[in-house]
């Protein structure tokens, strides 16, 4: 991956933690209908690689499908085989980042400190997941933004919802990961679509 990989920002990422293969296509299609262009299936969900494969087959031509909670190089390899194009992690593991970059996948390593963020950038990441975002805060993100390379985007994850998404957008976030405010296990596709539309409207109105 080149260092110009993030000339365009990611936008909102739908995090479908706990989704099953049987429901993932309906929910994923509802998210696409609402305007989402990136969907993450965390690997601690039931049969995650099957869900990723089904989702990539169904909507992969119009939506970036990827894996979350990726903790090892083996996870990266299996995620790619299932159809993942992004690799999202809660931590900054340089081996995971390197494996993703080597496979032309886009890594989103988690960082809670500037030291972790710079380590991730040094390993090849050009998108940093601020996690947990409520610990870093918008003021912290602005401080990171002032010292990180301009081509590196910052995406808050953890505690981001309808009450504060606009604040993150106006603070300069390149996107945000949305979990339980968007999807909880067992939610219907219609329910998820309604939430997705509301969140997308907030983001579209306030993103820089």
Image (tube, grey):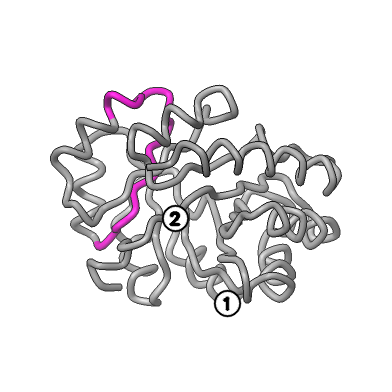
Please give the residue where the numbered disc 2 appears in the rendered image. 10
Given residues 23 and 189, the one toward you in this image is 189
Residue mark closest to the camera, 1 vs 2:
2
Query: Quick one: SS at disc 2?
Result: loop
User: Within the image, what quadrant is residue 10 found in?
Assistant: bottom left
Side of 63 where 113 appears, left or right: left
User: The N terminus lies in which quarter of the figure?
Assistant: bottom left
Given residues 95 and 105, the one toward you in this image is 105
Side of 126 where 200 appears, left or right: right
Up-down relation of residue 36 to residue 191 (above or below) = below
Query: Quick one: SS at disc 1?
Result: helix
Q: Is residue 136 magenta?
A: yes
Given residues 37 and 103, the one toward you in this image is 37
Residue at 36 percent across and 24 percent down: it is 137
Residue at 66 percent across and 45 percent down: it is 17
Residue at 66 percent across and 32 percent down: it is 181
Crowd tier of the residue under label 1, counting other residues whose Cα lies within 10 Å: few below 14, some 14–19, many 20 or above: few
Residue 85: x and y in percent read: 51, 69
Crowd tier of the residue under label 2, counting other residues whose Cα lies within 10 Å: few below 14, some 14–19, many 20 or above: some
User: The C terminus lies in which quarter of the figure?
Assistant: top left
Residue at 59 percent across and 55 percent down: it is 40
Whole-number angstrom distance, CA of label 1 to CA of label 2: 22 Å
Residue pushed farthest left? Answer: 147
Q: Over which residues does the magenta segment extend?
A: 124-140
Residue 118: x and y in percent read: 19, 47
Residue 81's disc is: 1
Residue pushed farthest front? Answer: 205
């Amino acid at each position: 991956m080149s260092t110009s990989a993030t000339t365009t920002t990611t936008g909102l990422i739908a995090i479908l933690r706990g989704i099953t293969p049987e429901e993932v296509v309906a929910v994923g299609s509802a998210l696409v209908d609402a305007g989402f262009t990136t969907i993450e299936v965390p690997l601690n969900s039931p049969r995650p690689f099957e869900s990723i494969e089904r989702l990539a087959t169904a909507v992969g031509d119009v939506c970036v499908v990827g894996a979350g909670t990726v903790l090892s190089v083996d996870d990266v390899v299996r995620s790619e085989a299932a159809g993942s194009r992004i690799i999202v992690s809660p931590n900054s593991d340089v081996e995971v980042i390197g494996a993703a970059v080597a496979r032309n996948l886009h890594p989103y390593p988690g960082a809670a400190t500037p030291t972790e963020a710079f380590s991730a950038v040094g390993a090849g990441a050009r998108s940093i997941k601020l996690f947990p975002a409520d610990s870093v805060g918008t003021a912290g993100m602005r401080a990171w933004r002032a010292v990180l390379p301009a081509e590196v985007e910052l995406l808050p994850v953890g505690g981001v919802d309808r009450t504060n998404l606009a604040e993150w957008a106006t603070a300069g976030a390149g996107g945000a990961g949305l979990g339980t405010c968007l999807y909880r296990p067992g939610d219907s596709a219609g329910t998820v679509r309604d939430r997705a539309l509301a969140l997308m409207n907030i983001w579209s109105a306030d993103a820089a």
